[in-house]
Image (cartoon, rainbow, N blue to C red):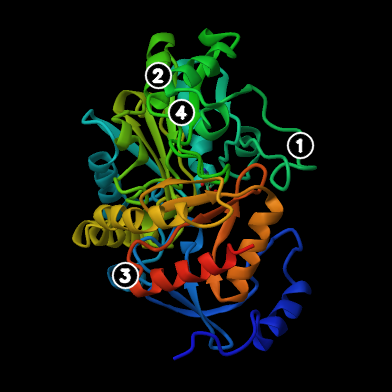
Amino acid sequence: MARLRTEIPGPRSRELGERRKGAVAAGVGSTLPVFVDHAEPGLLVDVDGNRLIDLASGIAVTGVGNPAPRVAAAVHEQVDRFTHTCFTVTPYEGYVEVCERLAELTPGAHEKRSVLLNSGAEAVENAVKIARHATGRPGVVVFDHAYHGRTNLAMALTAKEVPYKQGFGPFAPGVRRVPGSYPLHDGLPGPGAARRAVAAVERPDEVACVVVEPIQGEGGFVVPAPGFLGELAAWCREHGALLVADEVQTGFCRTGSWFACDHEDVVPDLVATAKGIAGGLPLAAVTGRAEVLDAVHAGGLGGTYGGNPIACAAALGAIDTMRELDLNAAARRIEATVLPRLRTLPGVVEARGRGAMLAVELVSAEAAARVAARCHAAGVVVLTCGTRGDVVRLLPPLTIPDEVLAEGLDVLEGAMQP
Ligand SMILES: *Cc1c(COP(=O)(O)O)cnc(C)c1O
């Protein structure tokens, strides 16, 4: 059966696109303006009956599948029991259980605590709040090409001006941006890149935390050189600052381990998670050293919806799925089949990534946009990224059927031809 029934977007999607213009803010973009009707394994089926190959997972969210049976069952069960109480008014078991799982799964065997939130940006903001409270210091160190979200403090931490920051200032103070590790462009070994980074920090004794993506996401799927993260961790220990790992995009099996820090045996003080945690339901967390989290006074952390019971049920279903299907192994298999193939494609400056977080850097933003547009026209959902916009990235669901993934790669290969 042919996957596509109409041109992309089809007539029904175009109609909804017109309707959208009269109601949805223009500032909310869409990479591929097909309106989705439902999903099947590895596929999004649009309102015109086109079956699109999903190599984006809603930006690394539906790694467990969409919908994933255990997530769906857990949501159905919870939604019929109760939908909300606000954990800070009257608690419920699901929240506690998610925090217990986070303590088990995040790097390090030390005693941990968690706070649950709604989005990656909120998690990163809370990590900074907690680090400032614990250290009594104001400063935050972040990196070139960093992406940490769209709220005010998160915009301050994010590097890329357009579209994330342009016209939205003033931004939160206290943020120092330093060079990171981008092996293709700086050629530095990891420890050297880290030493260059911290050398740019004028007052180490005023730094509350260093916030780092263990593999940069929106900034271009940049895998730091080995030893970069470890050297940052050592600097933090030496200067009494906390290492905050933003694992929002890299977490929950995406890179072939529970967290990307695991690949380097780095144990951050605080870990921010979201995206892949709950199979598509909005949930986020900050997990870290018990003494750091517990130092915050009662009432200092929280929010109306943070750790919503339906989202917690979904997270427990998603984590069960990751374990049962061994999605870490699945991500490593995807790396083993896809990465060598990406290296052979024409026009690739560098193919890189880990697990099912893979990308090709191309010669220009125009080249990346052209490849993405060709994939979209052929019904394959891919995203671009990179501060310069010159990277095409792949974030397939970890449960994508082999033949669907192979067909998606065939389309990508065709799109890369000059
Ligand atoms: C997506 C992302 C965020 C922001 O998450 P939201 O849920 O969109 O607020 C923060 N950090 C990283 C690394 C991300 O990829």
Q: Which residue is mark 2?
A: 231
The amino acid beneath tag 1 is Gly
How crowded pointer 3 is (Cα within 10 Å; few <14, some 14-19, many 20+) is rated as: few
**Could you tell whether 211 is left or right of 259 in the image?**
right
Provide the secondary structure element on which disc 2 rests. helix
* CA distance for labels 3 and 2: 48 Å
* CA distance for labels 4 and 3: 33 Å
Q: Which residue is mark 3?
A: 81
Residue 23 versus residue 264: which sits nearer the camera? 264
Relative to residue 37, is residue 287 depicted above or below?
above
Q: Which residue is mark 4?
A: 130
Relative to residue 390, is residue 1 depicted above or below?
below
* Badge 2 or badge 4: first in the primary sequence: 4
Q: Which residue is mark 1?
A: 169
The amino acid beneath tag 4 is Ile
Counting from the top left corner in percent of width and height, residue 1 is at 44, 91
* Badge 1 or badge 3: first in the primary sequence: 3
Please name which of the two marks, 4 or 1, marks the residue nearer to the observer: 1
* Badge 2 or badge 1: first in the primary sequence: 1
The amino acid beneath tag 3 is Arg
